[in-house]
Every structure is written in C-alpha cells, then in structure tokens.
Amino acid sequence: MTPEALVAWCPAKVNLSLRVLGRRDDGYHELDTYFQAIDLWDRIEVRPHDRLSLACDDARVGEGPDNLVLRAATALRGLAPVPGVGAAFRLTKRIPVQGGLGGGSSDAAGTLLLCARLWNVDPGPERMQALAEALGADVPFFLFGGTAHGTGRGDRIRPVPYLGDLPILLGVPAFGMSTREVFAALGERLTPQAAGVSVRAFSGPKCRGDNDFSFMINDLESVVFAARGELRTFRDALVDAGALGALLCGSGSSVFGLYPEGFDLAPVARGLRERFARWTVVATRAVARGAYVAAPAEGGAG
C-alpha cells in the first residue's frame, strides 16, 4: 500500500435533460438523460488505516456505514490482496446535499478510484462499472464525466461529444429535496414519452454553435415546482438573464442556467444574490472529466 495520502476530486453534475419513461419491473424508473459534469468539487483524502473510517466537515452528512464513501470502500475491499485492509477517509463537502447535483454518487465513484490505487486493486473496467451500478444509478457517470447519455436507471452510460466549457450559473436554495419523495409524488402522473429525448437537437458540435437547446427538459419539474414554486421563479430568472436554457437539477432542489461561451456571469450572479437573498448562487462551468485521483496538493479544477 502507498503510505502517503491520496486525494480524489469528485465533480458535481447537472442533467441537461431528464425524461422519465415509465416504471420498471424492479421498482426503479426508466430514464433517458444527458449528464454534464461541472466545476464544483468534493474532496476526499485517504490514508492507510487498520479499519474503514470517515470524517466529514458537513454535519448533515452521516459518517456511518450507510455513507456512500464507506459503502464504495467496502464493495472494493473484497477484491484487495490483503484481507481486512482499511482506510481513513476525510471528506470535504462543497457539493450541496439534496441539491440534485450527484455529490454522494460522485464521492462513491471517487472512492472506488482511490481504493483501487491505495490497495493496488485492478478490477478492470467492466467490474468497476458493475460496482458503480450496484452503489447507485448516478455513480457510473462519474467514472466517465464530461458529457454523457444515460439510459436504464441512468446507469448505462455512453459518452457523447463534450458540450464545451460553457458557463453555468447554479442556484441552491436553503432547503433540499428527497429524490425518493419526488419520484413517489410523480406516481400516477407519469406518462411514458413516445419520442423520448431529442437526440438530434443535442448531437455533436451543434451544442457549441447554433443549437437552441430545445432538448433541455426535465420531467420532474412539474412535481417539484408544484411543491416549491420559488424554484420555478429562479429558473425563469435565469432565462430572463440570458440563459440558453435553464432547468431543475435532477430531482432538485438546485436550479441551473446554461449560458453562451464567453458570457460574463458575474453581474447576473450579483443580481440574483440580491433578489434571492437566502439562495447560494455559484458561477461555474462545464468540465470534461469525472472523478479522479491526484496528489494532495493537486486537482479541483476541470
């Protein structure tokens, strides 16, 4: 094992589109979605230890065995050459909890990569993918990052041409949303979409030029906005401020706007912070990578 600390940088994501196509026999929902990694990162530091342990700087994040960091480490530990090997993790949260930004899933992907390096384990891409799928529907995306198409539960990932370093303005309210509760509320309102996602509108270099981003749609907005109308208000404010498109992030509660290349987000961010005083407004951008391992002094940028 490596005696020095290792660090994984784990990005947030937004869903450029999210179509809910129906309920599956296994109880999950069939999704058709496009993911985009963004320049907002959790940091996980790990050192060799005689057991698995986790410390986190965010009191809202549990440090017990149900945390995805420890679940991911436990999943990979069975492949380690030394039985019962351990690791001490320190998680620094920057991705908001229950914001629909995939922070827990990204942390799980980063942990798989960290432990593979720390314990000298090489599961191979297929086994790593299977481990990620078992941990959660969004986890496989973070092994890829960039721009990707997700089907099934969202866990069958196909990379697509990178969107480009487009500016993204993120609004995070003072409350979170439960993914489980949002899908439960969808319930009988769910109507399968015959056409699915508009792949044509998304394809290739059109994303960087004359695309009108009409493909951007989130089927969960109707449920979430009915419960929290202020999220719709913030989304509309992003569009009024020049966004190419704006959506709820996953199942919420965060909302994002995608802006043209070279757009100056600073004045828009200032205006939204004044108007939505209880929100956190973050100026960020798309990035072309997923979770990755670096030396402690490195990383955290796309």
Image: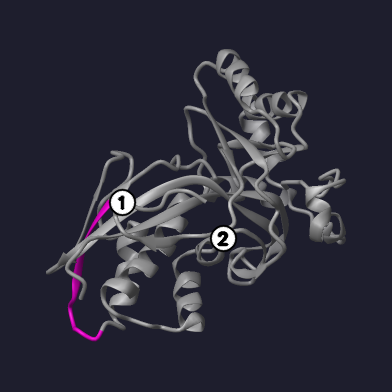
Q: Is residue 68 magenta?
A: no
| Mark sitting on residue 22 | none
- Which residue is tagged 1? 297
Please give left or right for residue 156 compared with residue 105 in the image.
right
Disc marking residue 145: 2
Please tell me how crowded label 2 is: few (under 14), some (14-19), or many (20+) other residues with Cα within 10 Å: many
User: Residue 276's x, y, as percent?
Assistant: 57, 18
- Find the distance from the CA under tag 1 to the CA under tag 2: 22 Å
**What residue is at 60 percent from the left and 14 percent from the top?**
275
- Magenta segment boundaries in residue numbering: 81-90
Is tag 1's residue or tag 2's residue first in the polypeptide sequence?
2
Amino acid identity at mark 1: Ala
Q: Is residue 212 left or right of residue 67?
A: right
Location of residue 110 in the rendering, given as x and y in whole percent from the top left corner: 40, 62
Based on the displayed image, in which of its 4 quarters is residue 119 positioned? bottom left
Amino acid type assigned to the residue bearing label 2 in the image: Gly
Q: Is residue 88 magenta?
A: yes
Relative height, residue 154 to residue 188 (above, below):
below
Q: Residue 176 location in percent, x, y? A: 49, 36
Q: Residue furthest left?
A: 50
- From the viewer's perspective, is 118 left or right of 281? left
